[in-house]
Image (tube, rainbow, N blue to C red):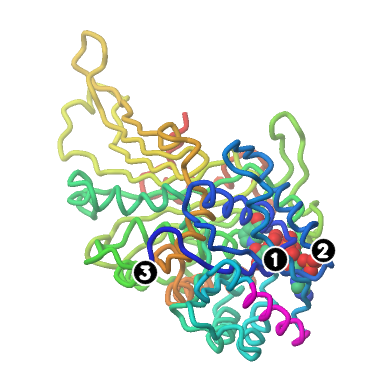
Amino acid sequence: MTTNNPKAVIVIFGATGDLANRKLYPSIYRLYRNGKLSDNFAVIGVARRPLTNEDFRNNVKASINDFDDPNIDPDEFASHFHYNPFDIQDLEHYKALESLITDLDKTYQTDGNRLFYFSMAPNFFGTLAANLKSEGLTTTEGWTRLVIEKPFGHDYDSAKELNDQIREAFNEDQIYRIDHYLGKEMVQNIEVIRFANALFEPLWNNQYISNVQITSSEVLGVEERGRYYDSAGALKDMMQNHMLQMLALIAMDPPIKLTPEEIRSEKVKVLRALRFFNEDEIENYLVRGQYDRGIVNGEELPAYREGNGVDPESNTDTFVAAKLLIDNFRWAGVPFYLRTGKRMQRKSTEIIVEFKDLPMNLYYDKDDDAQPNLLVIHIQPDEGITLHVNAKKGDYSASSTPIQLSYDNNAQDKMNTPEAYENLLFDCMRGDSTNFTHWDEVALSWQFIDIIADAWSKKKADFPNYESGTNGPKEADELLKKDGFKWWDVSE
Ligand code: NAP
């Protein structure tokens, strides 16, 4: 693994798209500004439309307009960007691209290192990988790596087919599958909080933890993404990747070393220990929902089925709550409740670890205020940790009251907290695949999700079943209530 200032020609396929403009160029800029990239880098933007280098550089400059850093000359930064009009089917275009990469490699002295970033619709990925190989672009004196965007398939079979196609051209250790949640500072912090504190790890098991709650809620609906979303839904769009990845990080055993292989191996063990449900059991463990109309911030919003590109009879889930069980020594008997949805009450991703009550708590009888201890990991939009403990009430009584010990990651150094894509691009350029998903993880996640998706596709749900601006269907509350728990709303 190389350290700082990696050198490479970065080829972005889909360079005129939303992701490239909103996330990738600003991330490259931040790496450049923070001294993580030396001058030995070039970016080649690839897409169909016939832009000139100047047009392209103007787009890049527009995407970093908000930064306005007096120490960085935007023209100097943009001069590293080059545009290459391209049709994926046309093999001649690959030859032209190869010659541009070779030229830029010489100009910027990038040691033959190539990073291909597939930021376009997934149906192009297979052809693109095959053509890059057949036209010789994957053979170089330096390293060659592929970053590939989500979604990685829409079920196990399609994911396997895509993987087989890509593996024809790239080895597994050259493939960096993006799950941008893994680039988030506080998701990366899960391991540090767990494995760098004597306080938590000894308690991190079924003897001391009663349940774990992972919530990722959005206030927005599907907006302009209705057509795509209607074929996916919350289960495939969020649960299969981001939610199961956070679960694996929370539940994994300590790796013997902090290497990508050792960490992955522990995560894979968690996914292997997930209890798979059969079709008849699913309704006992999962709740699906779809948003109805509702009032959000004083505005009446339409139902999901009334959205652009959405089937008016759609059976697609915009909300999922699940009770998952990990059948291993550490976690037997501890429910992991996962919940994700659109048009919910607030935008937030957080993990709450609820500790068991003391065998005898002298204060519970006296005071209803006493709460179980909670460790809350705020992933977004707040970044931090809050530990809920009980302390003496500030009055003359001997009763207790919950207090919170908080750490706000943003408050430390807001300007310099890296963005997810910035972290991930930098990791890839350094050859660190820790925060990317390995095929083994993708395969196991899809195998788990497929059973649920199949069962749901066979049985039409009674949708819509939750009002916009709420916390999902009431059955999601029941899921915890029947176990004697409740979803904690720790924002209050
Ligand atoms: P997008 O805005 O639709 O952009 C697609 C890009 O592909 C454009 O640059 C388009 O440029 C290019 N393109 C389309 N057909 C082409 C062809 N035949 N040959 C060459 N280039 C072609 O898509 P996006 O939102 O940026 O998403 C890109 C990828 O990121 C997708 O896999 C998506 O699932 C994933 N993703 C996006 C987001 C996001 O926030 N946008 C979030 C998570 C994941 P031309 O029209 O000029 O060819």
- x and y, in percent, of residue 65 in the image: 69, 42
Write down the quadrant of residue 386 in the picture: top left
Q: Residues within 10 Å of mark 2 (few under 14, many from 20)?
A: some
* Pointer 2 residue: 51
Quadrant of the drawing holding the N terminus: bottom left
Residue span colored magenta: 90-103
In the image, residue 171 above or below residue 385: below
* Magenta portion: prevailing SS class: helix
Asked whether residue 8 appears in the rendered view, the answer is: yes
Q: Are marks 3 and 1 in contact (CB under 8 Å)?
A: no
The mark nearer the N terminus, 1 or 2, is 1
Residue at 44%, 71% (x, y): give it. 277
Type of residue at label 2?
A: Leu
Asked whether residue 232 appears in the rendered view, the answer is: no
- x and y, in percent, of residue 347 in the image: 57, 41
Left or right: 131, with 362 as reference point: right
Asked if residue 168 lies in the magenta stretch, the reply is no
Which quadrant of the picture is home to ligand 1? Answer: bottom right
Q: Is mark 2 within 8 Å of ligand 1?
A: no
Considering the numbered disc 2 on the image, is that residue within a helix, a strand or a loop? Answer: loop
* Pointer 1 residue: 45
Of residues 446 and 265, the one nearer the viewer is 265
Q: Is mark 3 within 8 Å of ligand 1?
A: no
Left or right: 106, with 335 as reference point: right
Q: Residues within 10 Å of mark 3 (few under 14, many from 20)?
A: few
Of residues 422 and 355, the one nearer the viewer is 422
Residue at 66%, 39% (x, y): give it. 66
Marks 3 and 2, how far apart at CA? 36 Å
Q: Are marks 1 and 2 in contact (CB under 8 Å)?
A: yes
Type of residue at label 3?
A: Met
* Pointer 3 residue: 1
